[in-house]
């Protein structure tokens, strides 16, 4: 068995509060490099192991498929993002987040998320071409800061004709639990 990311349970609870979850696609798919939603297991992972590949996807409502739930959110232009202030406080700079290829939203830099890869020192996230050809965001977050970074900056964002709307703002894990 691979080693587990120490804050797996807490991160799973935080993501579930948003009705999203990580799905392990490391070994469950015949072709994990270009999976279809029909191929992805319907049980979300609650333990995140090092060197496993995960996709961040919505949790289907009862009697709905993952594909239908995901398609509905895409049609409504709702996406999970890391929404990081452009000007970080001294405390926030200590998170040492490395981020590229996001987009600007008011006073924030936003990064799409859908692929997660846990290593011993960092969590790597990206937005693959499978989900968006427009932005291929990438983030590297040191493992000791993952839960705090997600508590502060993870949110759902919706694109509308009038601009962006934060559907569920970043929320502290301590307030959820």
Image: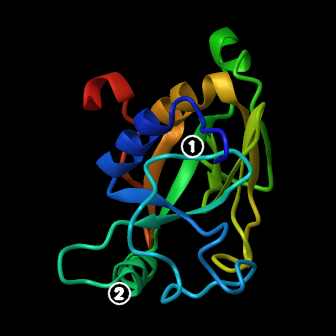
Q: CA distance from mark 1 to mark 2?
A: 26 Å
**Which is nearer the eye, 167 or 122?**
122
Single out the residue that lies furthest toward the top. Answer: 90
In the image, residue 160 lies at what x, y percent?
A: 43, 70
Residue ID at (75%, 79%): 33
Q: Earlier in the sequence, mark 1 or mark 2?
A: 2
Q: Is residue 42 above or below residue 116?
A: below
Identify residue for label 1.
83
Question: Taking 172 as reference, is 129 left or right?
Answer: right
In this rendering, would 177 be left or right of 161?
A: left
Secondary structure under the numbered disc 1 in the rendered image? strand
**Residue 78 occupies quadrant:** bottom left
Q: Is residue 164 visible?
A: no
Q: At x 40% / y 67%, what residue is drawn? A: 58
Give the image location of residue 172, x and y in percent: 38, 27
Q: Picture quarter containing residue 60?
A: bottom left
What is the number of the mark on residue 68?
Answer: 2
Between circles 1 and 2, the one closer to the viewer is 2
């Amino acid at each position: 068995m691979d080693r587990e990311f120490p804050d797996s349970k807490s991160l799973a609870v935080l993501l579930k509060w948003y009705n999203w979850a990580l799905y392990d696609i490391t070994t469950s798919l015949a072709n994990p490099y270009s999976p279809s939603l029909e191929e992805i297991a319907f049980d979300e992972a609650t333990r995140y192991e090092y060197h496993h590949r995960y996709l961040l996807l919505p949790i289907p409502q009862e009697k709905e498929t993952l594909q239908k739930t995901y398609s509905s959110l895409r049609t409504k232009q709702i996406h999970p993002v890391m929404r990081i202030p452009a000007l970080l406080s001294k405390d926030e700079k200590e998170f040492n987040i490395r981020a590229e290829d996001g987009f600007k939203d008011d006073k924030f830099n936003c990064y799409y998320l859908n692929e997660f890869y846990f290593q011993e020192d960092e969590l790597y996230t990206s937005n693959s071409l499978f989900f968006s050809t427009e932005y291929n965001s990438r983030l590297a977050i040191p493992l000791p800061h993952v839960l705090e970074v997600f508590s502060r900056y993870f949110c759902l964002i919706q694109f509308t004709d009038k601009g962006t709307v934060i559907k569920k703002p970043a929320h502290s894990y301590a307030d959820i639990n």
